[in-house]
Structures are given as C-alpha cells and as structure tokens.
C-alpha cells in the first residue's frame, strides 16, 4: 500500500493533535522544521512546515480517531 505525501502529512498532523494538543502539535512541527532546516534539509523542513500549517481546529477538532 502506497501512502502519498499528503496522506502522511494528514496522519502526522492528526497524531500530533491527539498527542500534544493544537498549540503543542503546531509548535513541535515548527521546531522539527527549524531543526531540519539548520541541518540543511530544506525539503524535510518544508514538509514539517506543511504539517504545522494544517487546519488544527477545523478538520481535526474531532479527535476520536476518525479523519
């Protein structure tokens, strides 16, 4: 089974919301992006910035496991 980049971003965003809450998940994703950018991984940083940019309170407001 192939998981697209968009699906992976959605899964990481949902997991982060459930585990860390909206603010914590966004802060953590931006922290990971910053760390990757400092190490020279611009592509990885861009992906984590997309995770941080997800609609944290809209689509994922129901954290019961359904997406």
Image: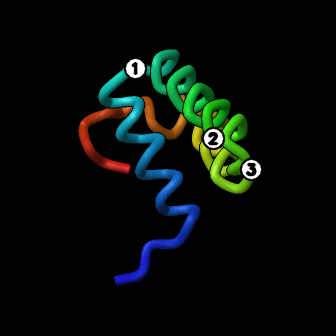
Kindly identify the residue that appears in the image at 36 percent across and 33 percent down.
Answer: 62
Residue named by callout 3: 42
Q: Is residue 29 shown above or below 9? A: above
Query: Gap between marks 2 and 3, in whole Å?
Result: 7 Å
Q: Position of residue 67 (x, y in %)?
A: 38, 50
Q: Seen from this angle, which residue lies furthest front?
A: 39
Task: State the SS at label 2.
Answer: helix
- Kindly indicate whether the residue at mark 3 contacts the one at mark 2 (C-beta within 8 angstroms): yes
Query: Gap between marks 1 and 2, in whole Å?
Result: 22 Å
Left or right of 25 in this view: 52:
right
Colouring mode (rainbow / by chain / secondary structure / one colour): rainbow
Give the quarter of the figure containing the N terminus.
bottom left
**Going from the N terminus, do you reach mark 2 or mark 3 first?**
2
Residue named by callout 1: 21
Residue 49 placement: quadrant:
top right
Q: Seen from this angle, which residue lies furthest top?
A: 23
Residue named by callout 2: 36
Residue 45 placement: quadrant:
top right
């Amino acid at each position: 089974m192939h998981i697209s980049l968009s699906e992976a971003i959605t899964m990481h965003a949902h997991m982060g919301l459930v585990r860390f809450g909206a603010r914590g998940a966004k802060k953590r994703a931006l922290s990971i992006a910053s760390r990757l950018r400092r190490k020279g991984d611009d592509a990885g940083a861009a992906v984590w910035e997309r995770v941080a940019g997800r609609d944290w309170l809209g689509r994922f407001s129901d954290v019961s496991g359904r997406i």
